[in-house]
Amino acid sequence: MTAQPGIHGKRRTFAVSDAVDTLGESLAAIREADGLTWKDVGRVLGRSEDQASQYAKGTAEMGFTSFLLGLREWNGRFGADVLAMIGVKSVPLDSEDMTDNERLAKLLHLAHLLSLTLLDDGKVDDDELQAIGSKALDDAARGIEALRQRLSALRAND
């Protein structure tokens, strides 16, 4: 997962099996966090409950349409980790639906959670990051993306 010079330029390298495992781990975490059954997960992905559980175990490669359906339903909680393996991120386009007050609250909430983890040793370790969770990160990212979109529109109008 490091940038390699040479043949591939600045593209990141990764093992496809790691990507399948990472996507499966994300799917299993979503299922547990949301209290879903494999049937529920399969319904979202347009697949059977058996197939959905195979995705989570990393024993089956997910098709493109199922991946897109998962992204639409669970956004960054589903795709962020696997997309990060290739240096890409996904941000919902409905970011501009957030009010300025909501945007600030989401950013400050993340800042508060991060500041609490820094109190003991000045670092955010892996366990502390796990405790913060991806929802706070995703919410703050949506707020930042909305500001980026606004700034881009302002620059385009200049």
Image (tube, grey):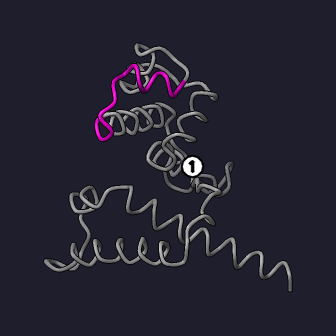
Q: Main secondary structure of the magenta part?
A: helix
Q: 60 and 74: which one is in front?
A: 74
> For residue 139, what is the image quadrant?
bottom left
Specify whether 54 is left or right of 126: right
Measured from the top left, where is residue 9 in percent x and y?
68, 55
At 61% from the left and 69% from the top, the residue drawn is 146
- Residue 50, above or below 143: above
Please report the residue visible at 41 percent of the width from the left and 16 percent of the height from the top.
49
What residue is drawn where x is 53% and y is 70%?
Answer: 143
Determine the image quadrant of residue 59. Answer: top left
Q: What segment carries the magenta color?
A: 32-45
Q: Residue furthest bottom?
A: 158
On screen, residue 36 above or below 137: above
User: Label 1's element?
Assistant: loop
Q: Is residue 148 above or below residue 20?
A: below
Q: Residues within 10 Å of mark 1 (few under 14, many from 20)?
A: some
Measured from the top left, where is residue 80 in percent x and y?
A: 49, 49
The percent coordinates of residue 148 (x first, y second) are: 65, 74
Q: Which residue is mark 1?
A: 86
Q: Is residue 41 magenta?
A: yes
Give the camera-side residue of 25 and 17: 25
Residue type pointed to by label 1:
Ile
Query: 98 or 155: which is nearer to us?
Result: 98
